[in-house]
Amino acid sequence: MARPRSFDQDAVLGAVRDQFWATGYAGTSVDDIRAATGLGKGSLYGAFGDKHNLFLRVFDDYCTALTEAVRQALDGPDAGAYGRLRGHVLAVADATASDVCLRGCLLAKATAELAAQDTAVAARGRQTFEALEELIASCVAAAQRAGDIKADSDPARLAGLLLAVLRGIEALGKGGSSPSSLRAIAETALAVLPRP
Amino acid sequence: MARPRSFDQDAVLGAVRDQFWATGYAGTSVDDIRAATGLGKGSLYGAFGDKHNLFLRVFDDYCTALTEAVRQALDGPDAGAYGRLRGHVLAVADATASDVCLRGCLLAKATAELAAQDTAVAARGRQTFEALEELIASCVAAAQRAGDIKADSDPARLAGLLLAVLRGIEALGKGGSSPSSLRAIAETALAVLPRP
DNA sequence: TACGTTCTGGACGGAACAGTCAAGAACCTC
DNA sequence: GAGGTTCTTGACTGTTCCGTCCAGAACGTA
């Protein structure tokens, strides 16, 4: 019927995401995006709308992918639940510590920069935090059923604590990683979980 | 000798800080600052240098004031150390939860937005995180001497964990506060601290 | 191959941006 | 009150910003 798009939409959205990730929303100009993607302005505006719309798109995709990655890391049978939880917490700490460019997590960056002014970003951020907390709570409950975490503690409260620790590790990582080392924080958080 | 400044420097710096706090570094124009302070551009540039320098100034002041406030909250005799620690953790959670405008903590906002690109901000942020961690560690050690926290745990590791929880509460607060409520997180963090 | 449709690239307009500067105002000292 | 110095105001420059628009290119269909 007509001329098809000549660019790979996923690749373009990935480049846009990386640009916003590196320099923030207000710190990224449409011309930066044009340079990062190689697209002309007409293509960008035609395919994705304006800058704000484009940001919401990549932010939404990021939140979806993050939630899905955590689900894959934590979901599974009761038997290995504690090991998966432990592995995930340590993996987040190690990934943050080795993030030399200090870009951190886009969810954290975006909510920090925009949540106060942009209700769409605030809502999506909150929804994502809640989804992460639920995934952690399910894994805690599974670890309790397997006898690896004390059964009488409230899994929702432990999940809230663990999520806060993870987001805190992320925040501290932006300061250049080290207060007593992020891995030590993760290990300590796991060590204080009530065992049967 | 000459004409003195007609503005109150502290008041101006406070207004500048609030403006950056509300809209971020890249999201704040010099004209926004001019409007917030009522000063002309010549006065602003003459007294504080360019936008970046002005930001570093208010960020530095903020870090100093934050550290000092935490010191006042946590410093004191061994006897009440645990109570001070507990009070501080709960106070941070309550303050974050009741922060309706979602501005959060400027230290978190600034490091999230700029640490990757601005080494001065990254260095000051890291220094502040380390100072906060030391203050918490001292308070934990005092609580251990008073017999309120188990003596054989490493105060530095517990301090790292508590700092991460506090920064995590702050980060979650930006998403619109509630995953299982910030206060519950603070209470759970205190509950899992090893008691004698 | 010819046509209609959609995509592409870049030029363009008007607004906002950071930072400079000069003319005049305000003050202290003498 | 006169002189010298600093502060204030706001106009100004040149750049960068976002978003629009159009001429031409690329494709599917007939």
Image (tube, coloured by chain):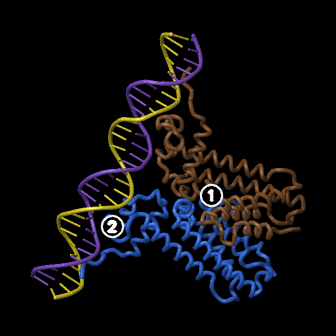
Chain colours: A blue, B brown, C purple, D yellow
Q: How far across and how far down the image is residue B155, in percent?
A: 79, 61
Residue for point 79% across, 70% down = B192
User: In the image, is residue C5 above or below residue A147?
Assistant: above
Q: Nearer the viewer, mark 2 or mark 1?
A: 1
Mark linked to residue A39: 2
Q: Could you classify mark 2 by the number of other residues whose Cα lies within 10 Å: few (under 14), some (14-19), or many (20 or more)?
A: some
Badge 2 and badge 1 both on one subunit:
no
Name the quadrant containing residue B172.
bottom right
User: In the image, is residue A195 above or below residue B176?
Assistant: below
Residue for point 65% across, 52% down = B127
Name the quadrant containing residue A77.
bottom right
Q: How far across and how far down the image is residue A51, in percent?
A: 41, 63
Q: Pinpoint the chain carrying mark 1.
A: B
Horizontal relation, residue B160 to residue A107: left or right: right
User: What residue type is disc 1 on?
Assistant: Gly
Q: How far across and how far down the image is residue A24, in percent?
A: 49, 60
Residue that badge 1 annotates: B104
Q: How far across and how far down the image is residue A108, in percent?
A: 57, 65
Name the quadrant containing residue C20.
top left
Residue A100 showing in the rendered view: no
User: In the image, is residue A152 above or below residue B16?
Assistant: below
How much space separates mark 2 and mark 1, taking CA atoms? 36 Å
Residue A64 showing in the rendered view: yes
As helix, strand or loop, the secondary structure at mark 1 comes to loop
Q: Pinpoint the chain carrying mark 2.
A: A
User: In the image, is residue C29 above or below residue C6?
Assistant: above
